[in-house]
Amino acid sequence: MNEPVIAVIGGGASGTLAAAHLAASGRPMRLLMVEPGQVGRGIAYATSDHRHRLNVPAGRMSAWADDPEHFVRWLRGHRHPCATAATYAARADYGSYLADVLRTVSQLPQVRLTVLAARAVALAEHHEGLLLSPPATGPSPRPANGSRVRAPPARSGSTPERSPTSMSGTTTPWSASPTAPHSGPAR
Ligand SMILES: Cc1cc2nc3c(=O)[nH]c(=O)nc-3n(C[C@H](O)[C@H](O)[C@H](O)COP(=O)(O)OP(=O)(O)OC[C@H]3O[C@@H](n4cnc5c(N)ncnc54)[C@H](O)[C@@H]3O)c2cc1C
C-alpha cells in the first residue's frame, strides 16, 4: 500500500505543529513542507532579540497537549536550567523548540519528511493528482529548473494515495538530516 503524501504549506508555528502531530500519529507517510524561511519561526518566532518574550508562560506552550511540561523540560535542557512553568521564554527559543519538535518526530522510521525551501504559488488539478508549484527564489515566477511537485488528489477528509514524483530544490533547514534514522525517543 502506498503511503499517503501530505503537503504542509508554510512552516510557521501552525504548519510545524500540524506536521509534527501528523508525524507523531504513528502512520507511515511522506510529509512535504513548503517553507521559504526557517522551519518553526514564522512571524512571531523569527526574532533573534531575546528581549522579545512569549506572552504566555512556558507551562502553557507545550507542543503536546498530553504533556504540558514538554516545553519547560526543553527549556531546562537547552536554554535555562532554572526554567519553570511560569517562565516567559524568549520567542526565539520557542521557534527553536518548534523546529526541534518536528525534527525529532520526523526521525521516526515511518515518516519521510522533505522540506522545500520555496514559496508555494499555485495548486492545480493534474491527471496524476494535484500539481503544487513553488517558484524559484528570485524574480522569475517559475522555477528556473522547471521543478514541480506532483501530489496526488487531496480531498477534504481523505488522504492521497500516490507519491510526489518530483521534489527538486529541496534543502535541509537543520544541521541534522530530517530523514536520518531514528536515534531516540519520538519526543
Ligand atoms: C510579534 C508577534 C508576537 C507573538 N507572540 C506570541 C506569543 O508570545 N504567544 C503566542 O501564543 N502567540 C504569539 N503570537 C501569535 C503567533 O503569530 C501565532 O501563535 C503563530 O505563531 C501563528 O503561526 P502561523 O504558522 O499560523 O503563521 P505565521 O507565523 O505567519 O507563519 C506562516 C508561515 O507560512 C509561510 N508562508 C506564507 N506563505 C507561504 C507560501 N505561499 N508558501 C510557503 N510558505 C508560506 C511563511 O514563510 C511563514 O513561515 C505572536 C504574533 C506576533 C506577530
Image (cartoon, grey):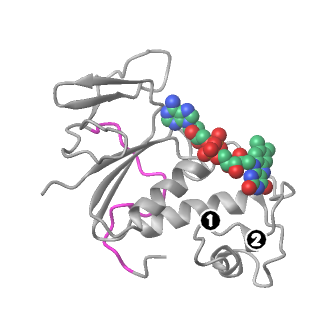
Amino acid under disc 1: Tyr
Check if mark 2's residue and mark 1's residue have beta carbons within 8 Å. no
- Dot placed on the residue nearer the N-terminal end, 2 or 1: 2
First to last magenta residue range: 167-183
Q: x, y (%) of residue 122?
A: 40, 23
* 2 vs 1, front mark: 2
Q: Check disc 1 and report the residue beneath it.
A: 97
Q: Check disc 2 and report the residue beneath it.
A: 58
* Identity of the residue furthest to the right in this view: 51
Report the side of 101 relative to 161 (left or right): right
Is residue 176 part of the magenta span, yes or no?
Answer: yes
Amino acid under disc 2: Ala
Tag 1, which secondary structure?
Answer: helix
| Quadrant in the picture for residue 71 | bottom right
Q: x, y (%) of residue 55?
A: 84, 58
| Quadrant in the picture for residue 128 | top left
On the rendered image, what quadrant is the N terminus found in? bottom left
Viewer-closest of 108 and 158: 158
Mark 1 neighbour class, 10 Å CA radius: few under 14, some 14 to 19, many 20 or more:
many
What residue is shown at x 69% (from left), y 42% (from top)? Answer: 43
**Ligand 1: quadrant of the figure:** top right
Mark 2 neighbour class, 10 Å CA radius: few under 14, some 14 to 19, many 20 or more:
many
Q: Give the overall secondary structure of the magenta segment.
A: loop
Q: x, y (%) of residue 65?
A: 60, 71
What residue is shown at x 83% (from left), y 73% (from top)? Answer: 87
